[in-house]
Image (cartoon, rainbow, N blue to C red):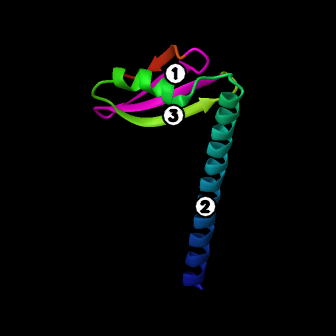
């Protein structure tokens, strides 16, 4: 009985973890879909164009990738330098840096 209970708890934990991963995947997919739609509508610049401006200015940092906020039209580019995470927020319409956190 003890082994059955342990196995049941493990299955519930695995199911919860898979569900959380699926939810994150759905969020990421919606994020990408909204960025794609905004780009096609001419509301924001291509991500590659923004990255080509920002990434070279972050010497010594590893680029980890973007997030997009469809409500504000802001890309958040994530970098890692010396164990510190740096976020650079860029207006998707103009390509201008609108915020930065971490150094």
Residue identified by numbered label 3: 66
Q: Residue at x 52, y 13 (%)?
A: 96
N-terminal-most mark, 2 or 1 = 2
**Image quadrant where residue 40 sits:** top right
Q: Which residue is mark 1?
A: 89
Tell me the residue at 31%/35% (across/down): 83
Numbered disc 1: secondary structure: strand
- Image quadrant holding the N terminus, namely bottom right
Residue 70: % across, % down: 68, 28
Which secondary structure type mostly characterizes the magenta part of the structure?
A: strand
Asked whether the beta carbons under mark 3 and mark 2 sit within 8 Å of each other, the answer is no
Q: Residues within 10 Å of mark 3 (few under 14, many from 20)?
A: some
Q: How dense is the environment of label 1, judged by Cα within 10 Å: few (below 14), some, or many (20 and up)?
A: many
Marks 1 and 3, how far apart in space?
A: 10 Å
Task: Choose the circle earlier in sequence order: 1 or 3.
Answer: 3
Boundaries of the magenta span: 73-94
- The reply to whether the C-beta atoms of the residues labelled 1 and 3 are less than 8 Å apart is no
Q: Quadrant of residue 2?
A: bottom right
Residue 55, position in %: x, y?
39, 26
Please check the rendered image and state whether residue 77 is part of the magenta-colored stretch, yes or no: yes
Where is mark 2, residue-wise?
Answer: 18
């Amino acid at each position: 009985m003890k082994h059955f209970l342990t196995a049941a708890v493990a299955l519930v934990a695995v199911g919860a973890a898979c569900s959380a991963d699926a939810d994150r995947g759905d969020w990421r997919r919606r994020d990408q879909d909204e960025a794609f739609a905004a780009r096609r509508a001419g509301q924001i610049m291509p991500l590659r164009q923004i990255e080509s401006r920002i990434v070279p200015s972050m010497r010594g940092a590893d680029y980890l990738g973007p997030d997009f906020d469809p409500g504000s039209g802001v890309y958040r580019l994530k970098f890692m330098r010396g164990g510190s995470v740096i976020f650079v927020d860029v207006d998707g319409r103009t390509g201008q840096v609108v915020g930065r956190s971490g150094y």
